[in-house]
Image (cartoon, helix red, strand yellow):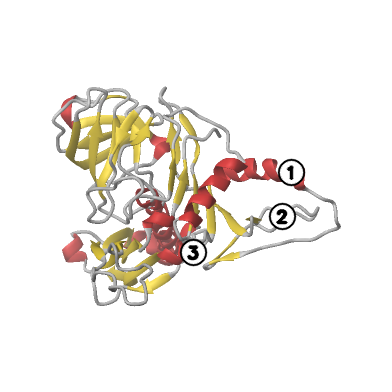
Amino acid sequence: MTWNAIKKVAWGPTTGWRNRTDRGSGRSGPVTETGAIPTVDVSAYVNISSLPRIVVSDFGVSVKSMFTGQLEGGVGDILAVEREGTMRDHIKEINQELLLGCGCLCSTAGGGVTEYKIPTALQCNRVGDTVGLSDAGGAVETGGVISAIASAGGTDTVTVTSFGVTPADGDAVYTRIRCGFTSIDDIVSEDAQVLGGQTSYPDVYNLTTRTAGTYAAGASVSYNSGVGRDLTLALIDTAILNSREHGGEPKLILLGHDQYFKLNGLLQAQQRFMGAAELQVGVGDERTYPGTATGLQVATYLGIPVLPDVDVPHSGDVDDATLGSNVYVLDTDYLELAIAQPTQYVENRDFFQANALVVRGLLYTMAELRCTNIWVQSKIADLNT
């Protein structure tokens, strides 16, 4: 899981950090033996901040089920069973939030200015997120807060407070403010990136301008206007190159299982049968898959660990179909999960407060995903499965 691959740090005494955006002009250069020294100038810094986000998972068990679970044929301690399951669900939810997509196209029109529909498989938002919308006419709306998401038949019907225009098939919807964790896809984005022919303007943290080629944009944000294309080594090489040219050194290639097998196929030509050998690489607290015993090493590419995750977001095409998963080339030296409060467990046995004979439990985590250098992170989207 991606959750395990990112380092964890204590929140610290501040709400954010600073990015150096300009080193000043004319302060370095050659001088003659008696020439004047360069004019004093100062660097420019931008404050980036993000408050802790809270993720909650709860459950309840009735007194009767607790008793019957101990009888012959029962599941045993049902409270412990439910608590263990909720713990797994809690980590899964955090992992999914870290890997939500930053934007997608509406698949069909919704019900007026307060509703739109997207394919469920795209997994872009949670209730409480603020989203923007751009349409073919150039209208840009930025004030919709998601109040409900209903899934049925492979389609999510998303209800928002209101847009100034009615969402239509093919309009781009993108995240402006997260209620939960900031996602990796939010971080590796830029202004006016093209989703299926429509421009999108996803924000991250407190940044409202993410001009391409600046500190607030990814090193390489590669889309293909919603037209699927096959993953190639050239695309990955370009993402790595751009990260390095921006001063980064990629430590992780994150992708979905579909692209993982595509990458295996691309590297098949390099396979050499040199006897049985396995390679497994650690990434944070996570481990890559071991390399095959035939000499083909699928755990790394150019020495960079390759980690597949089932929750990596997919792109969508112009015909509302779901494309393959994205590929991220990340310098994890600049990614961290800042923990304000580690996961806490709270249990309540107050029947009068619950107005029922139930024992309720709750897990919550207060943290946020920080990126202290967006400019060295890369993304490849609009890939075929």
User: Which class describes the residues within 10 Å of circle 3: few (<14), some (14-19), or many (20+)?
Assistant: some
Residue 68 in percent (x, y) is at 42, 61
The front one of 48 and 77 is 48
Disc on res. 4:
3
Q: Disc 3 to disc 1, how far (Cα)?
A: 29 Å
Residue under numbered circle 2:
297
Separation of residues labelled 3 and 2 (CA atoms): 22 Å
- Can you say whether 92 is above or below 363 in the image? above
Inspect the image, locate mark 3, and give the three-letter code of the amino acid beneath it: Asn
The answer to which of marks 3 and 2 sits earlier in the sequence is: 3
Q: Amino acid at mark 1?
A: Gln
Identified by mark 2, the residue type is Gln
The percent coordinates of residue 309 (x first, y second) are 52, 51
Image-based side of 73 in relation to 190, left or right: right
In this figure, which residue is indicated by the disc labeled 1?
A: 268
- Image quadrant where residue 51 sits: bottom left
| Residue 163 percent across, percent down from the top left | 16, 33
Tell me the quarter of the picture where residue 98 sits. Answer: bottom left
Pair 3/1: label in front: 1
Q: Quadrant of the C terminus?
A: top right
Residue under the image location 49 percent in, 64 percent down = 4
